Amino acid sequence: MTKKGVFLGTDSGATTSKTGGVWADGSIISTKLRQSSTNTQQGTAAVVKGWTEGVLGFLAENSLSWEQVQGVGLAIPGPYERYGVLGVAANLPKSFAGWDFYTEYANALAAAAGRPIPLVVGNDGNYGGVGEAHRVRGGQKASVLMLAPGSGLGTAYIDANGMPLDGDTLSGMEAGHMPAPLQLLGVRPYPCGCGRTWGCVEAYTTISGLPYLLEDILKKYPDHELNHSTLSSKEKVLSLRGRAQKGDALAIEIFDFQAKALGIHAANLVMALDTEFVVIGGGLMDPEATTPEFRERYLRILRESALPYLWPVQRGRVRFVPATLGDMSQAIGAALVALYTSKLKSS
């Protein structure tokens, strides 16, 4: 397989789809993704058309041809009823449940290329982890845990061969909905959008639980302006990141708490998975959204919260690092899974 062979990745978000690609040696073709609207409001046929047009546009922009394409990966939010068939997804129309997106995209790619194109599909969070793992490991053979707090908690485990843990029902690594150790955090069980009432980790580490965390911590700051603000709950929550970076004590305490909660959760997962790398992604690690001081403090507290719970040999080896691919990770990860799958089939 020469470097001229390419593997492409489609990242189908709820609103925006992105296309990227890698050469056959795993190097990224371009740091510029092809972006377009996912067009979910127009139905599944429009979505598939958009994915295909994204591939065509990426090939044209990078002077590539269908002859070079040896595989395509598709990253799409779950859950799934079975491989390639969508379940009821939180951010997609309910009418999409039962959609066989694998078959429809495979047919569209074959029609555009004039031949069948090998296609792999999987969870967008898992594929994002594949992209970040490839970057952080370099040529090293090691497993990677990725945690990406945002509106929810994206999690992924990538094995030493670069492949994600999908699980037998394709629901593997939904680790944001494991119970948090409330006795260590000293908090009550917060409700979670998934319906569980045991105190999902996601509720203590992401935007989704900030209204409850803010409500509890505000009691310690009776004179804080947010106690008397006319802002909506959402507006108050979204102001916290900026406040923390300006030295607001309440906001700093909230993000310190979230870092501690995520650190303890990371220790839980490292104890089970024994990874060498823990990659922290999400908006808090985005250089365009947070200051170096904020990111360094968050990672330090996370690391210090995790290490005491690990075995001595793990404490000496595990590395906590920030994500670096940003919004490229899922498209690049999808392309890499297509590449790795091709290698496994040919070996």
Image (cartoon, grey):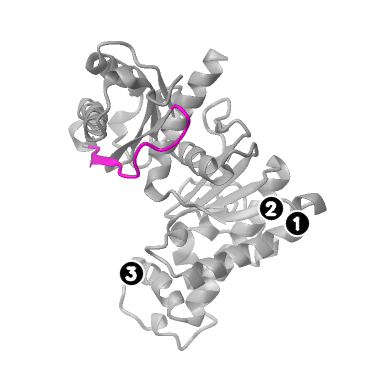
Q: Which quadrant holds residue 272? A: top right
The correct choice, above or below, for 271 with respect to 58 in the image is below
How far apart are the alpha carbons under marks 3 and 1? 36 Å
Compare marks 3 and 2 and give the one earlier in the sequence.
3
Report the disc number at residue 309.
Answer: 1
- Mark 2 = which residue? 267
Which numbered disc covers residue 295? none
Q: Secondary structure at mark 2?
A: helix
Residue 25, magenta (yes or no): yes
- Give the SS element for disc 3: helix
- Whether residue 22 sits left or right of residue 341 in the image: it is left
Q: Residue at x 28, y 36 (%)?
A: 93
Name the outermost residue toward the bottom.
223
Q: Nearer the viewer, residue 304 or 230?
A: 304
Quarter of the figure with residue 347 = top right
Residue displayed at 55% across by 46% down? 136
- Residue at (50%, 22%) from the top-left corner? 341
